Image: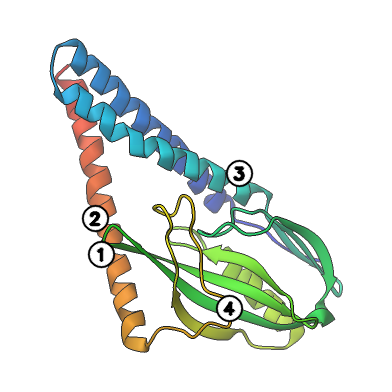
Amino acid sequence: MIELKRGGGDQFFIWFMVGMCAFLVLMLAFAGWAIMSDGEDLGALLIIWALPFVALTYYVYREAVARSFTRIAINWQTLELRLPAQRSYVPQEKLETSLPLSSIQAVESRAESFRALGNTVLQYAYALVLDDGRRIVLGADRRFISPYYQNAAGVISNNIKSPIRDLGLVDGNPGFLLFTGQSVPAWDAAPVPPTTMQKRFKDEAAAWRWVSIIVGAALAIGMLARAFN
């Protein structure tokens, strides 16, 4: 049997992020409450600033729970799947099934881009094409997490003796900030031109640099507020 498991470091990282997000929320809220008690308006600003991080904490927590219960295994000539709904930016159908490797006609991959509020994020999605025409989306890998679905797609591809088909990059609909209403085109949709694809990669790198700056600033403000309280 080949069972594909997430590494211990991967699991530790996602749960560590849950803890960090929750700590950031508590720190901003406590600092804001303490400053407001002294009659300073900055306290209210810190509490308002904490609200987006509440939503982020909830999102990361759901992600961590989903990652903890994902299972992809090959047992002789059978592929066993336990796939949660939260396995990409776009919610998928929750799936627990077994199917013969011989029923898999192809393994496909593509990059999916989402743009909102001037920022761009990418994910790399992988899917199985079955002999009856159905497609099962394995999931999508994202930044800062080890390429679990890429590894799974590679193992399945090797076992069915068929290379992974790269379908390029498509633009998805981010819905409301990738929290609700997000969607992606059908897997047979045409990819964006190569020049557009390169622009999406550059835009995503720039967006994550801004995220690092903002999070660092929030932590610094919280620490300074506590130091001078």
Q: Which amino acid does label 2 sit on?
A: Trp
Which residue is at 17% across, 28% downward?
224
Report which residue position mark 3 lands on: 65
Earlier along the polypeptide chain: callout 2 or callout 4?
4
Q: Which amino acid does label 1 sit on?
A: Ala
In this rendering, position of residue 126 left or right of residue 128: left
Q: Quadrant of residue 91?
A: bottom right
Distance (Cα) linking label 2 and label 4: 31 Å
Q: What element carries label 2?
A: helix
Q: What residue type is labelled 3?
A: Val
Residue 157 position within the rendered picture, expressed as x and y whole percent measured from the top left: 68, 81
Earlier along the polypeptide chain: callout 4 or callout 1?
4
Report which residue position mark 4 lands on: 187
Which residue is at 47% across, 74% downward?
111
Q: Do the residues labelled 1 and 2 touch (CB within 8 Å)?
A: yes
In this rendering, position of residue 45 left or right of residue 103: left
User: Residue 210: which numbered mark, if any?
Assistant: 2
Residue 89 position within the rendered picture, expressed as x and y whole percent measured from the top left: 50, 58
